[in-house]
Amino acid sequence: MKTKHPLFNVQKHLASHLHYDFRLEMNGVLKSWAIPKGPSLDPVIKRLAIEVEDHELSYANFEGVIEEGEYGGGPVIVWDTGKYDYLPDANGLSVEEALEHGKIEFFLHGSRLKGHFILLKLKSRPRQWLLIKAKDDEARPGSEITEEYENSVITGRSLYDLQKEDASGKLKRHRCK
Ligand code: MN
């Protein structure tokens, strides 16, 4: 069954290194890429996106602290979320086929990320992709969206707010499988 307007989200995650987890809903799971420098709205910027394991859909709006010692231990906030539309190319591939072929184009309807983006797999480099903003009306040359917006798009909290809440015992921890 196809979801007509599937979900995308970006979680900002301070594990051993700060990164942004970019996720696209596909076939009932969240396909996921870790982007060390985060997404950009500048079409000349190509951001490395490392393919990581699928996550459950229920993880999409998770904010909290993954326990120290667990994989990815550290605070997570939802940096952006919304729907996306897959943009089929001239060959008419399904989104799953496009993923398999190593090039997916889509239109994001987020609060911070909007417009046409491309995920392009690097040849001969396993799991390494590039996230690129296509040139359109939503492109913002010269901008750095991750510096303009640092906190949660849902709650306004920063990663450090979560760490403080966690230290005070107010926050639920998330155990990563
Ligand atoms: Mn992560």
Image (cartoon, rainbow, N blue to C red):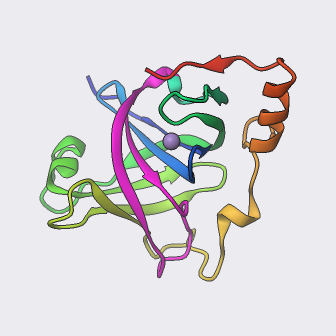
Quadrant containing the N terminus in the rendered view: top left
* Side of 95 where 31 appears, left or right: right
The answer, for residue 95, to whether it is visible in the render is yes
Q: Nearer the viewer, residue 52 or 91?
A: 52
The answer, for residue 158, to whether it is visible in the render is no
Q: Nearer the viewer, residue 19 or 58?
A: 19
User: Dividing the picture into quarters, in which one does residue 63 lie?
Assistant: top right
Identify which residue is drawn at 20% across, 51% down: 98
Magenta-drawn stretch contains 85: no
- Which stretch is magenta? 30-58
Question: Going by the picture, which residue comes out furthest to the front?
Answer: 69
Identify which residue is drawn at 29% across, 28% down: 27
- Percent across and percent down for residue 149 are 74, 58
Quadrant containing the C terminus in the rendered view: top left
Identify which residue is drawn at 78% across, 26% down: 166
Tally of marks: 0
Magenta-drawn stretch contains 52: yes
Q: Nearer the viewer, residue 63 or 165?
A: 165
Q: Is residue 71 above or below residue 52?
A: above
Q: Nearer the viewer, residue 135 or 46?
A: 46
* Side of 60 where 95 appears, left or right: left
- Percent across and percent down for residue 43 are 48, 77
* Side of 10 where 132 appears, left or right: left
- Percent across and percent down for residue 129 are 31, 61
- Percent across and percent down for residue 55 are 40, 29
Q: Is residue 59 above or below residue 162?
A: above
Q: Is residue 57 above or below residue 22?
A: above
Identify which residue is drawn at 34% across, 24% down: 28
